[in-house]
Image (tube, grey):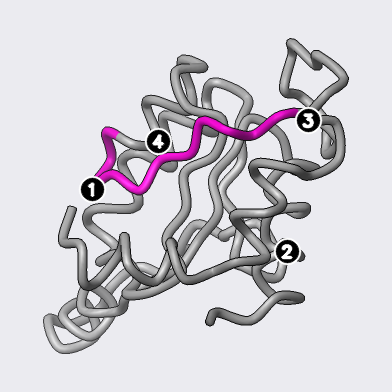
Amino acid sequence: MRPRERFIPLARHVGLIAFLTDGPGKDTGAAGRSGPTGDYSRIGVDFGSVGFCHVATGATDVYLEFAKGFALWDLRPGQLILEAAGGTVCNLDGTPLPWPTDAFTDIDTMHAAMNTRQTFVAAGSHEVAEAIGATLSASPMT
């Protein structure tokens, strides 16, 4: 992880840190971490598809990127794995990330698509991803 690009913006997001550490369900002993009121203290700010695999296996509760965005070639393989395991990958507004349906007809179109960077929230359930995304949107960074 590059601290200036990912960790510092995360650490400055006071509302997100409060939600993750003191938010709803923190003291309830929620073991399944399957709903929006669970304990999401295991967040990932890894790099590449391995972070999605951590969520798919339950080693991480939430994996997010809201500062820089991921290149699609780093995002899509992990998204496939997590969604096959029952998880979800959403935009920060809670909209599930769609899979591209159009075939690339030329190299310029493919090049432009591959250079797109995407922010996201990945979690074991859509409700969790939506709750994290809403917290990101509602609370500014300091």
Please tell me whether residue 46 belongs to the stretch shown in magenta.
yes
Work out how far the residue at label 3 is from the one at label 1, CA to CA, in angstroms: 27 Å
Mark 1 neighbour density, 10 Å: few (under 14) some (14–19) many (20 or more): some
Q: Which residue is mark 1?
A: 47
Marker disc for residue 135: 2
Residue visible at 62% across and 68% down?
Answer: 92
Q: Nearer the viewer, mark 3 or mark 4?
A: 3
Q: Is residue 41 left or right of residue 59?
A: right
Work out how far the residue at label 3 is from the one at label 4, CA to CA, in angstroms: 23 Å
Is residue 119 placed above or below 36 in the rendered structure? below
Is residue 38 placed above or below 139 in the rendered structure? above
Q: Nearer the viewer, mark 2 or mark 4?
A: 2
| Residue type at numbered disc 1 | Phe
Work out how far the residue at label 2 is from the one at label 3, CA to CA, in angstroms: 15 Å
Q: Which residue is mark 3?
A: 26
| Residue type at numbered disc 4 | Phe
Q: Which residue is mark 4?
A: 52
Q: Secondary structure at mark 4?
A: helix
Magenta-colored span: 39-50
Residue visible at 53% across and 82% down?
Answer: 142
